[in-house]
Every structure is written in C-alpha cells, then in structure tokens.
Image: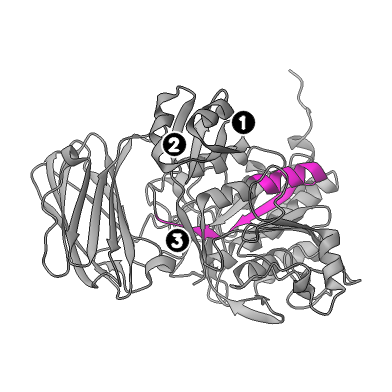
Amino acid sequence: MEIIVKFNGDIYSIAQRTGAQVELLKQDYAILDIPRENIEMLYEYAGIEDIELPKRLFLGTTYNLTSSCIRTVQDSYRLSGSGVVVAVIDSGIDYSHPDFRNDDGTTRILFLWDQTIPGNPPEGFAEGTEYTQSEINNALQEPDPFLIVPSRDFIGHGTAVAGIAAGNGGASSGENTGAAPRASIIAVKVGRGEDSFALSTDLMRAVKYVIDKSRELAMPAAINLSFGMNDGSHKGNSLFEEYLTDMADEWKISIVVPTGNEGSAGHHHSGRLSTNNTIETEFFTAAGLDRFYLSLWKNFADSFAVELIFPDGYSSGVINIESQVKTVRNDNAILTVIYGQPGRYSIDQEIFFDIRSINDTIKPGLWRLRIIPSVIVDGNYDIWLPTLEEVGTQTYFTDPSIYNTMTIPSTANKVIRVSGYNDRLGSIAGFSGTGRSDEPLFMPDVAAPAVNIISARSGGGYDSFTGTSFAAPFVTGSAALMMQWGIVEGNAPFMYGERIRAFLRLGANRTQGLSYPNPTFGYGRLCLANSLEYMRRYKWGGDRLWRII
C-alpha cells in the first residue's frame, strides 16, 4: 500500500530493507509502496521523521471577468497569460474543446498526464500516461482524436476549471473567454478510474510534475487545485499540507486552492468542555452510506472518554485512551475508534471514528456522541463529518458551527485560499467554506465569483457551474496575468509565490462597514485591476537593491 514519508538520509536503503518501492517527491518527501505487514518496520529507522497514510480528496462540484476586474486588465494592460503556464490538477481536460486551441487549431496544452491510463508514465513517476503537445496535435487531425489520445474528462469538472482560468472562447475573443486566454496549459488528470476522488498522494505527484515541467520550460506557473476534504485538523499540519507549503517555495509558482463548499453543510461542530461535565452532540446520517467518519480534534492535555450511540439505541460503551484502538460491531456496522497521538507538526490529538457497513449500507438516522471529561485544561474541541461530496446534504450535525469549514488543503500555508461569492448580489455564497473567527492565518485570502459561472463543457459547448471550485480558477488566471506582467515582461521578476498572494489581498475590493480580514470574504473580493495598479506603483522598489546600507 502507499504511504507518505518525510525522511532524511538514504531512503532507498530503507526501502530495500523493507521491501518498498520509492517515488521521490522532494529531497525529504517520498511515497513508499510497501507491503502492509512491513509498515511497522519503518519506525525502527532514525531517518524516517514522519509517516502518513494517504487520504481521499473530492472534487468540489456542488458576468464574472468584469466583476473581478480581469477584463479591465486584459484590455488596459494587454495581458493574456502568454509565456505563463496555467496548470489544472483535476478530473482531466477535454483537449478537443476549441477553448484550449490556438487560432490555427493547434493545442495550447503542453503536457497532459493522465494518471488513470497505464502505460507510459512521465520520467521519474510510476503510473499513468503522459501525452505531449505534438501527440495531442496529431490526435486533433483525426476524425476521432480519442482513439489516438484516449484521455477523457468524464466528470467535466477539470474542463470547466481550465476554461475559467485559461479558456479562449473557442480561439476568439468571445463572451466565454477565460482569465488568461493565451496561457500555455499543463493538465494532470488525477483520481481512481472515473470516480470523483483522488488520494492525497496523487495530488502530491501532480504538483511535483507541474513544477518539474515548468522549471524545465523556464516558465512561471499558476497551479489550480480544486479538491477538498475534512479528514484532518484543519491547521495545515498534516504531511500533505506541509508538503504543499514546502513546494510553494519551489520555482516560480503560485498554488491556488478553493475553501470548499462546506459553509452551510453542517459538517463541523465545535465546543468547550469543563471537568466532569458530560456533553452530548447529535448528528444525522443519510440513507445509502456504506462508510463515514468523525474526526475529533482536541488539546492533548485534556483527557476524556467517548461513547457513540447508534440510531437504534445501541451503545459502543465508554471508550477511553487506554483502549488505543477499539472495535465495536452493531448489526450491519463496524465502528473503529482510534486515539491518536500528537505528531511531529501538531500538539493536538485526534480521536478518529470510522463507521463501515459489513454488507449493504449503514442504517440512517440520529446518532449521539457523548464526550465524558475527566481532566480538562483547555477544553476546546472540533469535530468534522465528511464533505458533501462524500455523504450528501442529509448528513449533518444538529448544532453545527458556522466557522472553520474551509476544506483541506486550503488550510495549508503559502497557498492562495479562495472563497466564493455571488457577484450578481455581492453576497458570500452560502456554501462557501469559512475560516476561523479568531485566527487570520486560517481565513480566505480573497473571494471570487462562484455562482452560475459559464465555462467550457466536456464534450463541447458551454454550461453553467456553481461552487468554490469555479471561484479558484479566476484567481489562478489572475495570477498568470500578474506573472506575465511581472516576470515575462520584466516589470517585476519575482512576481510569484507569497508576493502574488500579498498583492491580491492588497487590491481586493472591500465593503464599507465590514471588518477585514473576515472568515467569509478574507481580505475582500478579487479585483485584479487594483492589484495590477499597486504592482505598477511598487515596480521599482520591490525587485531591485535600491537601498544600500
């Protein structure tokens, strides 16, 4: 099975001794494909700093260039994304769609790596098939190009995201033009077959691939990651999030991630405990689920037991930390409760509840979780249910929190976090993931249009899309235009990474009477024209050693 490791020293020697295959992601990160029974052996090696199992992330699936001030920039600054890579890591891309072609009919896609088609992986990677620009162009000459390059976007999510970030309205200046209509494109199709989820390891590979390709091409890159999950602490301290944070410092890139569609889903509950005061929280589950989880995070200094009451009234019994791992069977369901330990990057503790059906599905209904305190020092706790894409709208807490609903990996550091708003009304979209009310480090950076967005449809034509997945590519395309002005045109050679993020925040439109940053809009609504104007003002001071001490 695959696991993520952070290491130092000779990982290949460790792999040889444990029967593992190594896929090196970075100098100190790797994916090991290791026999399940040998995982315990890794703990014996001093060179292994941390280990994490891959987790499942789901696509966030649930007129705008003008409201985001992008059209003004395209016209006034004559920017189109030329010389910059827009990378879309998603469900694939319909490479035959005219939105991704030049005026002469050739493709703007430099590389397409389909991780789901075995056969010809990129150099240094173990799976999938890579298609080059020339191979795609050859395919486009055929009556049925998919017989030559069989990569398809069955879901349509990636095609729509790419159209918003870098579509060209069918190689013309049409109404459906994306933010960076002349940018070069690198597309990575991640996932498991035709499903709408990918493992965190799939995304880690994809980010490394895009950065490697962009560096080889000597082109800056804006990377769009429209995936999300709730399985984690939401504090940026998983190995997956730490990896994204580290990779954000590689090459001339910016990574853009939506805050997810969990704002009104009712999948987060938080509270505060006191010693000897039992708390009970309730949640409903929908019919048809064969698995779901609860991820409870608390201060490691606090001690308490838990008890889960099934919809039929059956109790798991009181489970405390002495049990470490406890398995309970009730009718058709198996409950596993795991008391975790603080990690290398986190002082918090997770209590993980995994509920699976033995066959068929889990009985739906009202569940009750009792938290039974013994010694409480801090008292604060957070619990997450899976995302809407995993469990639907009929699974929710009866007393949810309206804050801290940003999905992972938008909680990673050094990524640009994008929430979604309705640009026709000026109000935040109810589904948009929200940040923490007490911590600006875990709030969105900017909000972008997310309701009824017109973009390219897989299979041809255009359609309307809603969700924060479709807000993020407005920012991705904007980052590409900022990179073109700064790096390609020589106005600000270091216009990437945190600098892009800072200028997007500075230029955001803010409503009088609201305090910023806030958990919904972050620093305000995306306005690329304002950001470009500030960039122009700072042109000579930021990239040159103008002050000598």
Name the residue type under label 1: Gln
Mark linked to residue 433: 3
Residue 107 appears anywhere in the view: no
Q: State the colouring used for the structure image.
A: one colour
| In the image, residue 489 above or below residue 267 | above
Residue lying farthest to the right in this orientation: 104
- Assess whether residue 220 is covered by the magenta stretch: yes
Magenta residues, as a range? 208-230
Whether residue 532 sits left or right of residue 228 in the image: it is right
Count all numbered tags in the image, as a single digit: 3
Whether residue 67 sits left or right of residue 316 in the image: it is right
Name the residue type under label 2: Ile
- Assess whether residue 481 is covered by the magenta stretch: no
Name the residue type under label 3: Gly
Distance Cα–Cα, label 2 vs label 1: 16 Å
Whether residue 418 sits left or right of residue 237 in the image: it is right
Quarter location, residue 286 = bottom left
Q: Disc 2 marks which residue?
A: 51
Contact between marks 2 and 3 (CB within 8 A): the answer is: no
Contact between marks 2 and 1 (CB within 8 A): the answer is: no
Whether residue 522 sits left or right of residue 179 in the image: it is left
Badge nearest the viewer, 2 or 3: 2
| In the image, residue 190 above or below residue 146 | above
Q: Nearer the viewer, residue 424 or 91?
A: 91
Secondary structure under the numbered disc 1 in the rendered image: loop
For mark 3, does the 10 Å Cα neighbourhood hold few (<14), some (14 to 19), or many (20 or more) residues? many
Residue 83, how many percent across, how many down?
83, 53
Residue 493, how many percent across, how many down?
79, 40
Mark linked to residue 27: 1
Quadrant location of the C terminus?
A: top right
